Image (cartoon, rainbow, N blue to C red):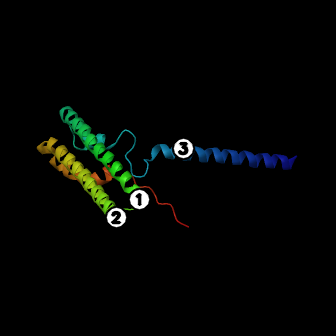
Amino acid sequence: MRREKFISFIALGLLVSNLIMVFYILKGREQQPAHGMPPPGEGPRAIIIERLHFNNEQAAAYELLIHEHRRAVNASNERILDIKNKLYITLVHPDEHLRDSLTDALAAEQRSIEMVHYHHFEDIHKLCKPDQEKDFEHLAEDFTRLFGPPKHPRPRVR
C-alpha cells in the first residue's frame, strides 16, 4: 500500500509541475512581442502617430499617405513577381542576355520601392509642425527597425 501511495504522490507532483510549466509558457507568449515586432495594435502606424504626437488632422492626412504608399509598393511588388517569373523561365530555356536584363530590371524595381519608402518618410516629415521636428529626428533613427523584416533566429545547421 505504501508503494502505491508513493507512486500516486509522484504522478500527482509531475502532473502539477507540467500544468504550471504550460501556464508559464502560454503566459510568456502573450506578454512578449514576436522577434522585435511591436506589440499587437501598436504597428508602425500607431507608433508614428504616437511618437510624433500627431493631432487628428495630421493623423487623417497620414492615413491618406499610408493608402498611397501601399498602392505604390503593391504595384511594384506585382511587377517584381512578373519579372521573377520571366527570370526563372530562363532556367528551363537559358538565355544569358535575357537573364541579365531581367536581373537588372529587378534591381531597378527594388530601387524604385526604396525611393517610394523614402518619399513616404519625406511626406510624413512634411506633416510635422515645428515643435515635432525633434520627435521626427528620433523616429527617423528607428525607421529601419520599424519597417524592416522581422528578425527571426536562424536555425542551426548541423
Query: Residue visible at 31% across and 63% down?
Result: 97
Query: Residue visible at 45% across and 47% down?
Result: 32
Secondary element at tag 1: loop
Q: Which mark is residue 26?
A: 3
Position above or below: 74 against 55: below
Secondary element at tag 2: helix
Q: N-terminal of the two: label 3 or label 1?
A: 3
Q: Which mark is residue 153?
A: none
Q: CA distance from mark 2 to mark 3?
A: 53 Å
Residue carrying label 2: 96
**Amino acid on which disc 1 is placed:** His
**Amino acid on which disc 2 is placed:** Glu
Q: N-terminal of the two: label 2 or label 3?
A: 3
**Amino acid on which disc 3 is placed:** Leu
Q: Is residue 5 visible?
A: yes
Residue carrying label 1: 93
Where does the image place residue 125, in percent across and percent down from the top left?
17, 46
Relative horizontal placement of residue 55, taking residue 32 as reference (left or right):
left
- Which residue is situated farthest in the left direction here? 130
